[in-house]
């Protein structure tokens, strides 16, 4: 059975948990403090062993380094999914990662033994839960250098279309897209329940 560990049970952690449960995956959810979660989920606290082959960091950008450092080499071989939009929330006018780089590239440098993917950052949580962006299916764009890792992520969720967006270098573009989508929603040009869709 496919297995996934999700660190963080906020808006995105809950939405991704729903996709994984819908796929019949074995789901572990780790939170800072012991929390009552869906009984189908194996609940734990951050620092517990990771039972999933796929590990999703459903955390604010600013918390990622601290949490991955806690796991250090326990992430070797894992499919490690970065979903962050590393926005400068003080100005709402730029990303905080160096130009040309990405939060996902930074993560791969920090945890070289893990197989890092960028995914879900271009999807508002509501569109993961509904499976729809307007009248179109929700598409999860995934960037990463390891084809098997992408297949593992696609296999552990259901209810959304998962599309390979290219190498980990494309995380830069996905983060730009996520940033733009956030500014459009904040400016009421699109809503927090819709956003960008990919027409076939
Ligand atoms: N919301 C969206 O629609 C959306 C869309 C695309 C991407 N994202 C990205 O997804 C990520 C999560 O967003 P969200 O909306 O799910 O945020 P959220 O609802 O605030 O949830 C964040 C989670 O991270 C946990 N957390 C925060 N700091 C932590 C730390 N130092 N150690 C361990 N856990 C910590 C929080 O735990 P506590 O409850 O204990 O504080 C909470 O469970 C962000 O990087 C965001 O940019 C969000």
Image: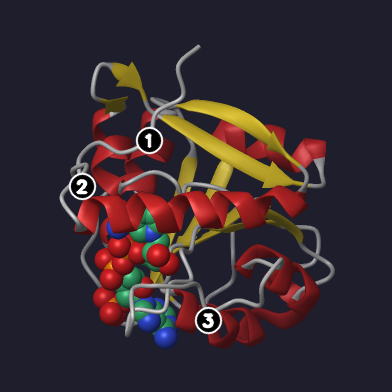
Query: Does 20 appear above or below 175?
Result: above
Rendering quarter of residue 197: top left
At a point 69% along the width and 71% down the height, the residue shown is 107
Figure quadrant, ligand 1: bottom left
At a point 48% along the width and 75% down the height, the residue shown is 61
Per the model, the C-alpha gap separating discs 2 and 3 is 32 Å
Residue marked by disc 2: 192
Q: Is residue 64 left or right of residue 110?
A: left
Q: Is residue 106 left or right of residue 23?
A: right
Per the model, the C-alpha gap separating discs 1 and 2 is 11 Å
Specify which label sits upstream in the sequence, 1 or 3.
3
Q: Check mark 2 vs ligand 1: CB closer than 8 Å? yes or no.
A: yes
Dot 1: element: loop
Residue 181 appears anywhere in the view: yes
User: Residue 47 has which mark?
Assistant: 3
| Residue 90 location (% of width, % of height) | 32, 85
| Residue 196 location (% of width, % of height) | 37, 35
Residue marked by disc 1: 196
- Dot 2 crowding, Cα within 10 Å, few <14, some 14–19, many 20+: some
Query: Does 116 appear above or below 157?
Result: below
- Dot 1 crowding, Cα within 10 Å, few <14, some 14–19, many 20+: some
Rendering quarter of residue 58: bottom left
């Amino acid at each position: 059975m496919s297995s996934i560990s999700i660190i963080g049970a906020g808006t995105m952690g809950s939405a991704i948990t729903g996709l994984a449960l819908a796929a019949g995956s074995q789901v572990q959810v780790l939170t800072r403090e012991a929390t009552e979660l869906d009984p189908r989920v194996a609940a734990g606290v951050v620092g517990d062993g990771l039972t999933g082959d796929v590990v999703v960091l459903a955390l604010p950008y600013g918390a990622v380094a601290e949490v991955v450092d806690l796991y250090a080499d326990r992430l070797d071989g894992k499919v490690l999914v970065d979903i962050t939009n590393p926005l400068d929330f003080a100005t709402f006018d730029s990303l905080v990662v160096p130009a040309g780089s990405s939060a996902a590239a930074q993560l791969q440098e920090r945890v070289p033994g893990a197989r890092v993917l960028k995914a879900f950052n271009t999807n508002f949580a509501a569109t993961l839960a509904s499976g729809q962006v307007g009248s179109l299916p929700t598409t999860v764009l995934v960037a990463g250098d390891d084809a098997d890792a992408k297949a593992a992520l696609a296999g552990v969720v259901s209810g959304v279309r998962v599309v390979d967006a290219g190498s980990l270098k494309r995380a830069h573009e996905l983060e730009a897209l996520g940033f733009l989508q956030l500014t459009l929603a904040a400016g009421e040009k699109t809503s927090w329940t819709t956003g960008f869709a990919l027409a076939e």
